[in-house]
Structure formats: structure tokens, C-alpha cells
Amino acid sequence: MALPEQYLLTTKNVDAFFNSLLNAQAPPKFTNKFLEQLEFKSTNDRLFIGVLKFLGFIDNNGIPQERYFKFLDQTQSKQILAEAIKEAYADLFTVNVKAHELSVSEVKNKLKTLTQGSKSDNVLSCMANTFSSLCKYADFSKHSNKEIVTVKKDEDIFEEATPVNEQRKMTHELINKKITTEMHYNIQIHLPETRDITVYDAIFKSLKEHLL
């Protein structure tokens, strides 16, 4: 079970927090001091650091990881966050591949099942609110609306484009052609032991006349 132990007590600053990351350079190490420099000075705001660790933005020592730097590219920021959410909440997405579209109450019920009643109702609410708030900020469009391409077999296309009688005729011709082109002869000649060269001449002359 890889469900989050990290969650927010309040989610009112989620959008503002991630926006502030986009407007600042990545720090050498993400600390409470850096968080305060971003104007998040509440003790509740410190929980954002744990969430960033859970999402793979920083390691356990607070060092920014590749995902953090990818997030800073504003052309893909919300897609990167969506990718992080799907990875961090893998168990939830296993239960429902469209977990990001669930309501808070639906998420809470799924989490209650996944945690097998080991979390209090208050903790489950915080977990569900955190997940839903993160999903609202993220962009899952490139993850959930992938283009589905249907590939038809050659025989299906053949059947759609050709009338029944013509299909049968063409199929018969193809079979005959295939049989004809694949037939071959394997002729083995056992030459007698002799010193008389005329014997060999006679054999090869006969082959030329009757087979070639």
C-alpha cells in the first residue's frame, strides 16, 4: 500500500503555492526558510514540503529533483503535476483510472477502503481534500484523453471494399497463385561410378531435353 502519509490540513493555498514555485528559482534545498521567503509562513504551510517529497519534486533531504525542474517549464507545469499525482497515488488510480474526476466524498470512500479502516475520519478527509485540490490544479487531459487508434486487419479492409462474389473469386485466384508459386521440384541424381565420360554426357543430355 503506497498511500500518502503526507497531506494538508487546509488546501486553500494549493494554487497559490504552486504558482509561487513557478515564479521563483529552484532552491539548492527546499527548507522552511525558503517556504517563508515564498510568503508561506503558517505552520500549516510547512506541510507542503512533505507533499512535495511525496510527489517526487524533492528528495527526503529537500533537494529538488528532475520533476521539480520540469514543473518550472510553464508550458508543461500542470501536466507534470498530473504525472506526479498518478504516480504518487498509484493505488487510488488502480481502483479507478479516472480517480482525478471523483468528488471529494468519493475519493474519501475509496481511501477508506484502501486503508482498511486504519485512518480516522478526519485524516481521511484531509487526504481526500489534498488529493482533490492537487488534481484541480493539475492538467490530466494528456493522460486521460489519449487518442485511440483502431487498426484493421488486411482481410477486414478486403471484405469491406469488395462484393461477396468478387471476394470469393479473388480469394480462389490468390490461393491458386500461392500454390503455384510455392511448388518446386527437388531432383536428386545418383551418378554411376564409371570412367566412361560418354555415360555422363548421355545423362545430362537427357536431363536437358526432358526437364529444362
Image (spheres, grey):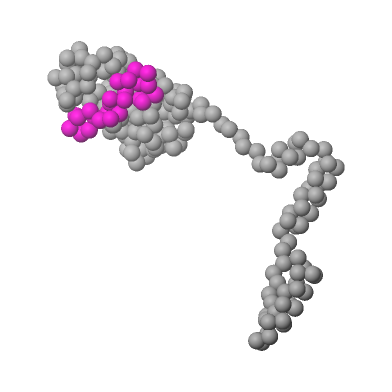
Left or right, 158 with respect to 152, comes to right
> Is 108 located above or below residue 15 in the figure?
below
Residue 48 forms part of the magenta stretch: no
Instruction: Give the residue displayed 32% in from the left and 15% down from the top.
Output: 15
Residue 71 forms part of the magenta stretch: yes
Instruction: Give the residue displayed 54% in from the left and 29% down from the top.
Output: 147
Instruction: Give the residue displayed 34% in from the left and 41% down from the top.
Output: 1
Instruction: Give the residue displayed 35% in from the left and 30% down from the top.
Output: 84
- Picture quarter containing residue 40? top left
Where does residue 123 sit, x and y in percent of width and height?
A: 30, 28
- Picture quarter containing residue 131? top left
Q: Residue furthest right?
A: 165
In depth, the one of 165 and 14 nearer the eye is: 165
In depth, the one of 112 and 208 nearer the eye is: 208
> Is 147 located above or below residue 157 in the figure?
above
Question: Quadrant location of the C terminus?
Answer: bottom right
First to last magenta residue range? 57-81
Q: Residue furthest left?
A: 33
Q: In this figure, what is the number of numbered marks?
A: 0
In depth, the one of 6 and 190 nearer the eye is: 190
Where does residue 104 sit, x and y in percent of width and height?
A: 41, 23
Query: Does the rendering let one see residue 7?
Result: no
Where does residue 12 sit, x and y in percent of width and height?
A: 31, 15
In depth, the one of 107 and 68 nearer the eye is: 68
Query: Does the rendering let one see residue 93?
Result: yes
